[in-house]
Image: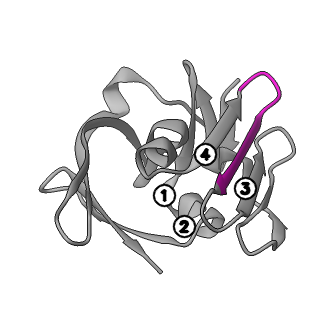
Amino acid sequence: MPHLVCGQAVVLARESERMVTVRLLDGRIVISDMAVHVVDGTWYLPSGELFHSLGLMVDVALDDGLMRGEFLSQERKFLLSSKDCKMTNVGGHSEDYRCHLALRHEDELFLASNLVEKLVPLRLRINSFRSEIIIDST
């Protein structure tokens, strides 16, 4: 079911898909071809693929609308419920978020880039001209 923003439905479709390279700040490639979606200037990233590639333990249960994850070496956990539009970040802070920032698409939960940054201590630098996302830990 599409989420509404200002009366319009947010839908991830073939037309909004882009292929990007994901790099760490030091230049190392994390993912060479990741399918993301850009809708009205908001970048939606496949949460499972992104977090797994960064070495995080993540479980995405689409039917329940839940994503649980943790940094294994640091025992810091995070949780996101796309049904309730609530999240608990790695610092243990819980908050509501706008429901259109987490969208189920096919077999993945896509998160808006700013929601990813709230959930885990990462800064995402998106360069649309070079089709790349550079990840920096905060």
User: In this figure, which residue is indicated by the disc labeled 3?
Assistant: 98
User: In this figure, which residue is indicated by the disc labeled 1?
Assistant: 113
The three-letter code of the residue at mark 1 reads Ser
Q: Residues within 10 Å of mark 3 (few under 14, many from 20)?
A: few
Answer with left or right where residue 100 lies relative to residue 137.
right
Query: Does residue 122 sit above or below 102 in this rendering?
Result: below
Q: Which numbered disc, 4 or 1, marks the residue closer to the eye?
A: 4
Answer with left or right where residue 64 lies relative to residue 9.
right
Structural distance between the alpha carbons of marks 1 and 2: 6 Å
Structural distance between the alpha carbons of marks 4 and 3: 25 Å
Coordinates of residue 79 in the picture (x, y in percent): 77, 52
Question: Would residue 60 be counted in the magenta stretch?
Answer: no
| Discs 3, 1 touching: Cβ within 8 Å | no
What element does badge 3 sit on? loop
- Is residue 8 visible to the viewer in this orientation of the structure? no
Q: Residues within 10 Å of mark 1 (few under 14, many from 20)?
A: many
| Discs 1, 2 touching: Cβ within 8 Å | yes
Tell which circle, 4 or 3, labels the residue nearer the N-terminal end.
Answer: 4
The three-letter code of the residue at mark 4 reads Met
> In the drawing, what numbered circle is on residue 57?
4
User: In this figure, which residue is indicated by the disc labeled 2?
Assistant: 117
Structural distance between the alpha carbons of marks 4 and 2: 17 Å
Structural distance between the alpha carbons of marks 2 and 3: 14 Å
Tell which circle, 2 or 3, labels the residue nearer the N-terminal end.
Answer: 3
What element does badge 2 sit on? helix
Query: Does residue 105 sit above or below 94 in this rendering?
Result: above
Residue at image location 74% in from the left, 75% down from the top: 91
- Is residue 103 visible to the viewer in this orientation of the structure? yes
Residue at image location 72% in from the left, 66% down from the top: 89
Camera-side residue of 33 and 85: 33
